[in-house]
Image: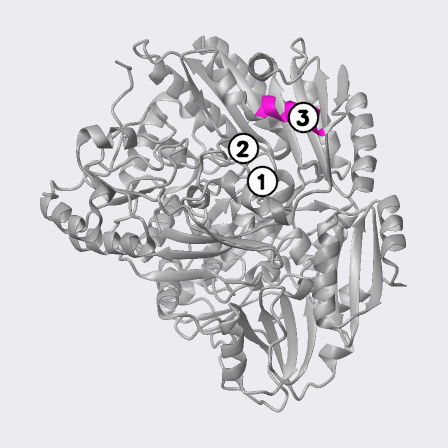
Amino acid sequence: MLNYPDVNFDEQRADLDLTLLEAQLRQLLPEDCLQTSAEQNRPFEADGLSAYRSLPMIVVLPENVAQVKAVLQCCHNFKVPVVTRGAGTGLSGGALPHRQGVLLVLTKLNRILDIDPDNMTARLEPGVRNLAISEAAAIHGLYYAPDPSSQIACSIGGNVAENAGGVHCLKYGLTVNNIVKLELLTASGEPITLGGSGLDSAGFDLLSLMTGSEGMLGVVTEITVKLLPRPIQAKALLAAFASVGNACAAVADIITAGITPGGLEMMDNTALCAAEDFANAGYPKDAAAILLVELDGHPLSVAAETNKVQQLLEAAGATSIQIAKDEQQRQRFWAGRKNAFPAVGRLSPDYYCMDGTIPRRALAEVLQYIDDLSQQYQLTVANVFHAGDGNLHPLILFDANQPGEFEKVEEMGAKVLEKCIAVGGTITGEHGVGLEKINQMVKQFSDQEIRQFHAIKRALDPDDILNPGKNIPTLRRCQEYRALQKTTHHHNNQPNGIQESLS
Amino acid sequence: MNSDDISTALQDQVLRAIAENAPLRISGGGSKQFYGEAVAGTPLSTLGHTGIIHYDPTELVVTARAGTPLSELEHLLASEHQILGCESPHFGSATVGGMVAAGLSGPRRPYAGAVRDFVLGCSVLNGKGEILSFGGQVMKNVAGYDVSRLMAGSMGCLGIILDVSLKLIPQPETEISLRFEKDAAESIKFTNTILRQGIPVSASCQFDGKLYLRFSGFDETLTAVQQQLGGEKISNAFWPELRDQKLAFFSAQSDKNLWRLSLAPNTPELQIVGESLYEWGGALRWLRTNEDTDKIRQLTQAAGGSATLFKSAENKHGVNTPVFHPLAAGLLNWHEQLKLAMDPNRIFNSGRLYNTV
């Protein structure tokens, strides 16, 4: 039995008899699209954040948009919560089921509806896997740029819900920068179209508001994404450093020189050794840190940038620099980074993946802070991060079979996130708030800001049907959490991400 | 550069407006007064709220107060070899806040991004008179709803932007501009083809049987590009003139409406009589015509796009036509609800975008 605490969920509804709802849903859906037994629903009790579990009463797996609409209308009539789930790879508990609600799983809506090579767009159902888009677009020499680590499995609908990033977003942007149109259903099942075929559309930029809204404002049923021409050439450089500080300085030097690499990734010794043992990527295991720099585009530009980056890396004190000599070696360099999470997973029974973003100038300071915490808590940390955009993914290693260990990890993780806020950053760069970071939201935003978020939610989902209780903390939680912080960490209580110097 | 924080005075003015139930008409540099529906209300100017709050070139981020002149900001960025990727129009005296509120992007838009793509965070005065901060100064941030990007293009209907943090891009080492003899259809195809070859196009424009392209990158790349493509080299000064609508296409024929059509780039030419100028590889089309407004909207909508009556003809032809493309009922309802969520007393620029927003 794993020792995880009970899910800390504010959202509680009066006890509902779901029998009538279930009977109506059965009328609307084919038999194999609805399941209610604990045995069948067990696989859906958690998303990628397996520490948080909650068994859904009813799981529906509709096969088309008409069925999704019917389910939403029905749940809306009963005022029953609906949690939408894609592939379930999310890392913040955003798709954690509601104990008194319906889990709406969209994996069966997995068709690529259209690829338009002339307009460089693809029209997709929400269950299409991220990687499948690029695979299908490849015959046209096109691809879809955002590439989260989970891209083999994660779905585009989930990417929209979380505003997913990936290693290429430094140059090519996040999900929000790469979608042009959404078809969605409101909480009551009304269809709405956001965006259009052009680059602008009339009215408010609701594409932005919807992207990253964690399934709380609508259910996305169709996504039109922007495709990019596959770069003619891509070159990868692998640089080793004797200190993490030197590697951080090299990152700043590359950006300041006016170069925007397609990817700029850093791994510390723990992470790079794990990745090397797992993937034989060719990483030097004696390095304190490695940087992986990818330059892509026109062959002449790539050549010029490669020269420049090589000089900058040398000047920053790189102990070795390898330039991938062919496509095979480039893929091998990336295989290490892309498999870093599972590779680190082999070092310990469990790991906890964090996701803060900080200004690049604070990289060295925050890494030192994490190192200090690691010693204080006696928990090993492997650092993997998107150095180019300051997005950290410290992986805290632990054993969930040890009583109390997960609570210790959560406490340490909370401190890391609060440090991110303190240096002017944010508690989540790309994984979302979900339920996981609901307490840290209280740190990052004032009560007035939280109230504004609730007003937006109420405006579009007045009955609080869609994924209630996630993303935005209740005001009660805000007050309780602030009171608790006052008594325990009164030195660390800056509500609004204002600079403070503690280390 | 002037630097003055008048947020408290602005807040007081908003609180007074709420107390007196007297709607406000927000303005910055006044460069886009012509754009959108007419608004009644007491003027509120952000012009006194100026200055750079934070600029660290190594972070590629700047935070500026709303009243800061866009030209001053761009001048500062140029001294660090950085630019705003959206290349928004100045129309004379644009401010940073006005640029974000109007959400208009310039020639670099398809190749670098729109205003909203560069907004990382902002502080706003909402319709309760509260000063709120959303987003931040980092490249990736998904905490809470993305209110800061929502402000881009909201035309002041949701709140007053006090300051904004913008992502920057490095200034390209070199830029060159080339002109080719091509009609609209050929131009779309040609631009699409060379983009796919990795040629670093950073702006495109077609009118009067000619295609204008700008390329950005390293010297040696651009020399090779010019050798490969041929064409006639022209001054880069063409692009600011296009951006600020100083070309004859925009200044002449002021007796006709100026329409702004947003369409998929490869959309065939719409059957509307009038002169057109294409930007953004065909995704943005300017149209000078007095053709029936309903017909223009229907044709655009049928092609999946939208049509804005950007500037009315001087003879007031079509003056009763809504400026912005009408929204479907469900979408309009969302606009109305969001307006009330941000501005419950409806004191900010009511009606500038849509009657009920």
Name the residue at 60% across, 24% down: A335
Name the residue at 34% across, 25% down: A50
Does the magenta run of residues contain A331?
yes
Amino acid type of the residue tagged 2 in the rendering: Thr
Residue tagged by mark 1? B139
- Secondary structure state at the residue bearing disc 2: loop
Residue tagged by mark 3? A292
- Secondary structure state at the residue bearing disc 3: strand
Q: Considering depth in this image, is A299 or A159 the residue closer to the camera?
A: A299
Q: Considering depth in this image, is A370 or B123 the residue closer to the camera?
A: A370
The reply to whether dot 3 and dot 1 touch (C-beta < 8 Å) is: no
- The correct choice, above or below, for A184 with respect to A87 in the image is below
Does the magenta run of residues contain B22?
no
Mark 3 neighbour class, 10 Å CA radius: few under 14, some 14 to 19, many 20 or more? many
Determine whether, in the image, residue A50 is placed left or right of residue A241.
left
What residue span does the magenta drawing correspond to? A327-337
Determine whether, in the image, residue A64 is placed left or right of residue B146.
left
Name the residue at 53% across, 70% down: B303
Amino acid type of the residue tagged 3 in the rendering: Leu
Mark 1 neighbour class, 10 Å CA radius: few under 14, some 14 to 19, many 20 or more? many
The overriding secondary structure of the stretch rendered in magenta is helix
Q: Is residue A485 visible?
A: yes
